[in-house]
Image (cartoon, rainbow, N blue to C red):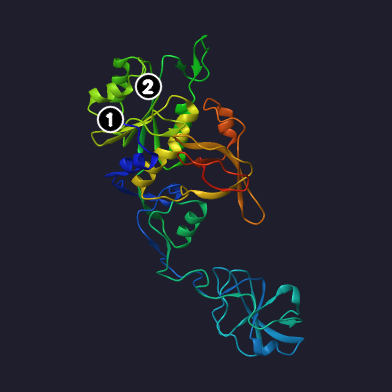
Amino acid sequence: MALISVSEALNRLRDNLSLLGVERVPLAQAHGRVLAEDLGAKLTQPPFDASAMDGYAVRAADVRALPATLALVGESAAGARYDGILEPGQAVRIFTGAPVPDGADTIVMQEDTEALGTSVLIKEAEAGRHIRPRGQDFLEGDVLLKMGMRLGARSVMLAASMNYANVLVRRKPKVAILSTGDEVVPPGSELGPDQIAASAGYGIAAFVEANGGIAIDLGIAGDDAAALAEAIARAEGADILVTIGGASVGDRDLMQEVLGQAGMQLDFAKVAVRPGKPVFAGRLGEMRVLGLPGNPVSALVCAVVFLRPILAARLGSFEGIDPQCAVLECPLPENGERESYLRAISTLANDGTRTARPVPSQDSSLVAALAESDCLIQRPRNGPPLPEGAKVIIWRLLD
């Protein structure tokens, strides 16, 4: 297959991608899930005029002239309102969050009063103050959480305030991850002279979980057709199969061949991208396949560029994956024939401007440099040299 652009690869990846099914989960288990329906408030919040302070509920007309002494006729606490109607010359002791008694329109802070047994002396007051009006937060029926939102701590709290005990969410995509290579062994192993600790699979699994999926570890398969076929068969039932390594065209790069024998229809095999040129994609029955390079840095960069859009499309949520604009902190040379993604560190200035500085080395074998980075600077194919201060597109590494 011919070398294709990143945009063309993304178009092919998104082709005929359907939304995942839905399931209803308890709100306590909803953090990080994607809403599958709009949520309208089931109640009005607050449901009544409430006191914002500890103090006394009074009528503004009774505290126009100060100091004023008012008869203390009762108490209103959260969960135990004062049932009477406040009459002229009266006050009710009230606590934060308690319903404001009928007839009252002002709360006087406790610090501005003096208790006198069956009466209270009002020293300072401001008409209409310290009352949270009914519906100040939201009204019954207000749609406050939208389909496609990823639920975080704040939105889970809001859903609870809206009186939802459970919510309808998209099913999490199941992503099977297969690492390959005779030289790759699990971290923590006693390494032989020609072996390296597997790292890409762990990074991709964490990336999948951070982007709303369920990572399924298929382990490490050696550069052997039978071992690869057996591992691929164990991916049955997954929504996406991600392979790491064996994606190029060397004698020991068997992944595409074995997948083809298993029935994969190849969508593309080479992309004009740096790092990650040998990335490939296809379809194996209902399962999408994304083949990533074995180099850990290339694998994770390609996951940002190619895997994240697949996950987002299946979940119907594109929150947090849009590119941003940044200002270069240093000049950049012209770019080559491949669209490049430079590891970089961004900074948010006091005026809201985001700047970006590439890490000193863009060698795709440097995992520590990738860990130091928080964004990727996107350079177009054959892009011209850029001076310091030029505007560039960046992709945040929010994993």
Which residue position is annotated with label 2? Answer: 246
State the residue lying farthest toward the top.
193
**As drawn, 369 above or below 26:** above
Give the residue type that dot 2 points to.
Gly
Q: Amino acid at mark 1?
A: Glu
Q: Residue 34, position in %: x, y?
A: 40, 50
Residue topped by disc 1: 236
Is residue 14 shown to the viewer in this render?
yes
Which residue is rendered at x = 43% and y = 39% of the image?
305
Query: Position of 251 compared to 376: left or right?
Result: left
180 or 250: which is nearer to us?
250
Q: Is residue 376 above or below residue 70?
A: above
Q: Residues within 10 Å of mark 1 (few under 14, many from 20)?
A: some
Residues at marks 1 and 2, CA–CA distance in whole angstroms: 20 Å
Where is residue 285 shown, x and y percent of the image?
23, 34
- Callout 2 environment at 10 Å: few (<14), some (14 to 19), or many (20+)? many
Among the 4 quarters of the image, the one containing residue 16: top left
Near-viewer residue (293 or 385): 385
Image position of 371 with respect to 224: above or below = below
x 61%, y 41%: residue: 331
Tag 1 near tag 2, CB within 8 Å:
no
Secondary element under disc 2, as helix, strand or loop, is loop
Image spot of residue 219 (x, y percent):
40, 23
